Image (spheres, helix red, strand yellow):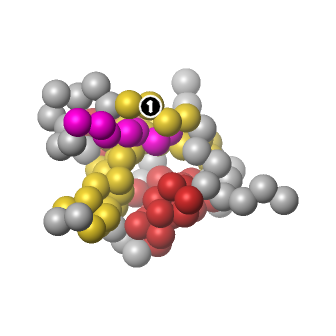
Amino acid sequence: MESVSPVLVRIKRSVLAGRYEFSAKAIDEMEADGLTPLDVAESILNAVAIYKTIRSTSPYRRREREYLYIIQSTTLTGCPIYTKGKLIAEGGVETYYFLVSAKRPE
């Protein structure tokens, strides 16, 4: 049996603890697709793997190297959701998961 990636475990623990936020873009995408924050949290908690990891190209990133994690999973009722987010550390302590995109997959 394969183990879950340590990064996915950290993301899931942040979500379970309620330590996650949405960008304005993610909120707009969720509203357009009729998704709630609970739908997004469920899909992340149901994920078995990180679909893809990409390096951030944003000029607003906090560190030289910052990664975005793409997760594709379903809610408890089977609704597929695509999310893209990053783990945020403040004062050297990982504090929350910030979602920059949350929508139904295209």
| Residue at point 38%, 39% (across, down) | 67
Within 10 Å of the Cα at label 1, are there few (<14), some (14-19), or many (20+) other Cα atoms? few
Q: Is residue 33 magenta?
A: no
Q: Amino acid at mark 1?
A: Ile
- Front-most of 56 and 12? 56
What span is in magenta? 64-70
The quadrant the N terminus occupies is bottom right
Left of 54 or right of it: where is 28? left
Badge 1 element: strand
Residue 50 in the image, given as x and y percentages of width and height: 58, 45
Left of 24 or right of it: where is 3? right
Residue matched to label 1: 54
Q: Does residue 21 show up?
A: no
The residue lying furthest to the bottom in this view is: 17
| Residue at point 16%, 28% (across, down) | 59
Residue 106 in the image, given as x and y percentages of width and height: 55, 24
Residue 12 in the image, given as x and y percentages of width and height: 51, 63
Q: Is residue 65 magenta?
A: yes
| Residue at point 43%, 65% (across, down) | 15
